[in-house]
Image: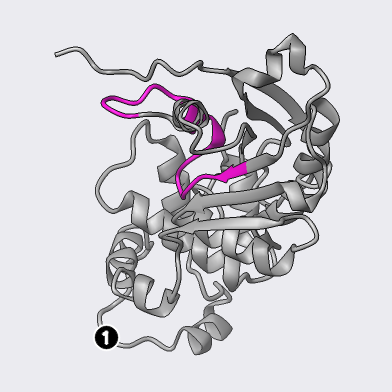
Amino acid sequence: MPIKRSKAPPGRTVVLRHDSEVLRGNPLGDPTSRAVSVWLPPQYDDRRLADRRYPVLYDLVGFMGSGQSHTNWKAFGENVPERAARLVHEKKMEPAIVVMADCFTSLGGNQYVNSSAIGAYADYLTREIVPFVDSQFRTLASREHRGCFGKSSGGYGAIVHGMKYAKTWGAIADHSGDSYFDFVYRSDWPNTLNALAKYAKPKREGGPIDVVARSKVTGEGLDDGRVAAFLDALWKKKKLAGPDGHTVMNLCMAVTYDPIPPRRTASACRSTSRRAN
């Protein structure tokens, strides 16, 4: 059965390259040169509207995603540019520019906040990508004509940006954004700890362990190397399997909101990260 596609004028997607100063020297050693996908509405290329400027919407993708993933072909559905084109064509949305930036990390993503253990991704968006887009396209370059939206981690990012960076964003939309972390993530930590236990060398004896007291005796720190070993193994895989996804997500949340000063894990990330862009 053929897939029904919208007959709306498609507009066009432009992929630019941006070299970040904000992300330079980030603890994970992730790339500083990144792709920025930008969808332009059909009206943008109409010569009769050559002086027209447009509001801008920023798409904050969920965990394990990147901006470019929202431009991919989607079976029995629409990607973000296709949906925007249809909504503009149906007059359910005014013509707008949609920006899909790359904020992926070696730990699977982030929540669009500044983290001493991952990188300053809030600053990356507000201090670099927003001015960069405004310099490249005919935008209405003010907060009154700029908004961000997202789902899951992207929804959380949109809420945080609305509260902390109101000088940048005039509107936000949160779709199923992460919230009430103690409730959402607590139930999965036993699975995460079990997954990490496979990488402990030597394996610890069963029963309660006072990790603080042990660290003073052994000098191994609060992490005995299992986290770094898990990440080393993860980055060598060609495909995530089993609990890998949730484990790395919980590790990412932990270092985002409760980072320890750079030590073994950070150095391991810098030396073994294979994140390509």
Considering depth in this image, is 148 or 227 the residue closer to the camera?
148
Q: Is residue 266 left or right of residue 108?
A: right
x, y (%) of residue 2?
20, 12
Q: Main secondary structure of the magenta part?
A: loop
Q: Secondary structure at mark 1?
A: loop
Q: Is residue 195 left or right of residue 28?
A: left
Q: Mark 1 = which residue? A: 207
Considering depth in this image, is 75 or 200 the residue closer to the camera?
75
Q: From this viewpoint, is residue 274 visible?
A: no
Indicate yes or no whether the magenta region holds residue 64: yes
Indicate yes or no whether the magenta region holds residue 66: yes
Q: Residue at x 77, y 54 (%)?
A: 123
Q: Residue at x 45, y 27 (%)?
A: 86
x, y (%) of residue 112?
62, 55
x, y (%) of residue 178?
45, 65
Q: Is residue 66 above or below residue 230?
A: above
Q: From this viewpoint, is residue 242 visible?
A: yes
Q: Quadrant of the N terminus?
A: top left
Q: Residue at x 79, y 39 (%)?
A: 140
Q: Which residues are magenta?
A: 58-77
Q: Quadrant of the C terminus?
A: top right
Q: Quadrant of residue 42?
A: top right
Q: Amino acid at mark 1?
A: Gly
